Image: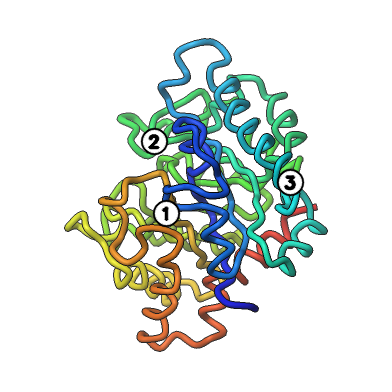
Amino acid sequence: MRKTFFIDGHCDTLSKALDENKSIYKNDLQFSIYNSNKIGGGIQIMACFVDTKFLKNKNGGFNRCNNILQKFYDYQLENKCNILIKNKNDLLKSLNSNNTNIILSIENGSAISENINNVKYFYDKGVRVMSITWNDDNELGCGAHTLYDKGLTKLGEDYVEKLNDLGIIIDVSHLSEKSFWDTISISKNPVVATHSNVYNLCNHPRNLKDEQIKAISKSGGIIGICYYSEFLNSTKKGSVKDIVEHIKYIRNLVGINYIGLGSDFDGMSVEKTATGVDNINGINNIINELKLQDFSDGEINKIMWNNWSNLLKKCLK
């Protein structure tokens, strides 16, 4: 692979670019396609984040998600060099491309606005990864900050089955524990945590306990390591070394094949981002730290892109 090729499981750049009227190609945000291309290109799973503030009105989540998607479509009309990855053939082309290409995801299943048929609608729009909740409870289930964990609702159970049927990858980041285990019990396909870390290293409710990490690996899924400081250590200011500690922990628990990147760029402020990876230009600092801690070139390639690549090859039709 040329320069630094990567696959990243989650960023919120698309939503932020819409709200701040900025380009996703060249901007002053944590992630841009321009800067990504400069370091070697790759594949970015780019989220349509549906904040709970948009859910006050009927169809608010659905409308918000469509507005974010339109931001990407408008960009793509002007920049035809970037592939929107919707199937295995698109993936294979992207792996051999010199550009940064995109997989669209949805963060917060409230995007469907309680209509299960909207899952197919978003699939037809090109979305290939969807989560169930954000931090709060919604019509599908309980989130990581729930006060009373009841797990998935009946609609949530139907939603998981619908994602499986269509081949949309299920993202369990932001779920409560019971919602997580309900999802694991229903899903027949691999599940991923696009941007979550290790609870035993940092006891934040957004992080994964050992049995959850084992369940994701058993499903054939991936844990994308997040750069958000509050998920990395108790001091609330993480570093690249902390990122590697979470990687090492998962490697020792379940093996190297279930670890990837999940930056969460533009879903957090620079101040709350781990030192050394303030933006996409810092990705080589992770590689350098992995080398310092005696990770082999093969292991580094798996973390940087190959594990996500293998997962996507299995899941995309």
Q: Are marks 1 and 3 in contact (CB under 8 Å)?
A: no
Nearest to N terminus: mark 1 or mark 3 = 3
Is 168 above or below relative to 202?
Answer: above
Question: What amino acid does circle 3 point to?
Answer: Gly
Q: Residue visible at 36% across and 85% down? A: 293
Residue 212's image quarter?
A: bottom left
Image location (x, y in percent) of residue 205? 32, 46
Check disc 3 and report the residue beneath it: 167
Q: Which colour scheme is used?
A: rainbow
- Residue that lies at the very extreme toward the left in this rendered image: 235
Rounded to the nearest angstrom, the CA distance separating label 3 from label 2 is 24 Å
Label 3 sits on a secondary structure element that is loop
Q: Is residue 276 left or right of residue 54?
A: left
Mark drawn on residue 135: 2
Rounded to the nearest angstrom, the CA distance separating label 1 from label 2 is 12 Å
Q: Residue visible at 63% across and 45% down? A: 129
Question: What amino acid does circle 2 point to?
Answer: Asn
Label 1 sits on a secondary structure element that is loop
Q: Residue visible at 55% across and 31% down? A: 109
Is 111 above or below relative to 307?
Answer: above
